[in-house]
Image (cartoon, helix red, strand yellow):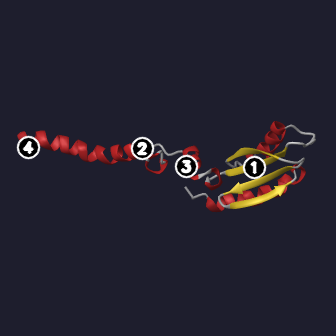
Amino acid sequence: MPHLNLVLPALILAVALPATSAYTYYRATRDPTLRPLGVTKEEMAANAGEEHALDITVQIDWGRDTEFGVAPDELERALSRSLQAFDADHHFRFKDVPGDDVLVTYIVGYNRFGPYHPTQAAAGIRGALTALQMVTPDD
């Protein structure tokens, strides 16, 4: 039976070592690609940059001097409803820009669709959805 006393710890070590090593690497580098059983889209987006995530980034350039008749949160809700109708994963990024223009750009990976004036923003949704389908792996 002394042989069993060595086998059990060796077996536990062999099973736990890969996960422990991956978790230690994650804690040291914050690189979520090797985090065991914990990789999320949000962490991947934060690590790779939002432009390379597997969703649609809706960038809204909001001019400081704009007199656009809609508030930023109203525009976000309207565009979000449009994208939700297609069950598309998306998030918004607002940029404060000089001037009076309000422009909407859809970003999927390295693809950019726009900029569009908010009244024409629906024109870019189809292209963004097509690009999203092309970069999203089949499950």
- Observer-nearest residue: 126 or 121? 121
> Residue 131: in sight, yes or no?
yes
Q: What's under tag 2, amino acid-wise?
A: Ala
Task: Identify the residue position indicated by label 1 in the image.
Answer: 59
Q: Nearer the viewer, mark 4 or mark 3?
A: 3
Q: Nearer the viewer, mark 4 or mark 2?
A: 2
Residue that sits furthest to the left in the current view: 1
Task: Check the image and report above or below for 130 versus 77.
Answer: below
Q: What's under tag 4, amino acid-wise?
A: His
Q: Give how far apart the Cα atoms at labels 3 and 2 are.
A: 14 Å
Query: Is mark 1 in CB contact (under 8 Å) with mark 4?
Result: no
Q: Nearer the viewer, mark 1 or mark 2?
A: 2
Q: Is 89 positioned to the left or the right of 5 in the image?
A: right
- Determine the residue positioned at 58% across, 44% down: 42
Q: Nearer the viewer, mark 3 or mark 2?
A: 2
Mark 3 closeness class: few <14, some 14–19, many ≥20 residues within 10 Å: some
Q: What's under tag 1, amino acid-wise?
A: Gln
Query: Is mark 1 in CB contact (under 8 Å) with mark 2?
Result: no
Task: Identify the residue position indicated by label 4 in the image.
Answer: 3
Mark 4 closeness class: few <14, some 14–19, many ≥20 residues within 10 Å: few
Q: Give how far apart the Cα atoms at labels 1 and 2 are.
A: 32 Å
Q: Is 30 positioned to the left or the right of 105 in the image?
A: left
Q: What's under tag 3, amino acid-wise?
A: Asn
Task: Identify the residue position indicated by label 3 in the image.
Answer: 47
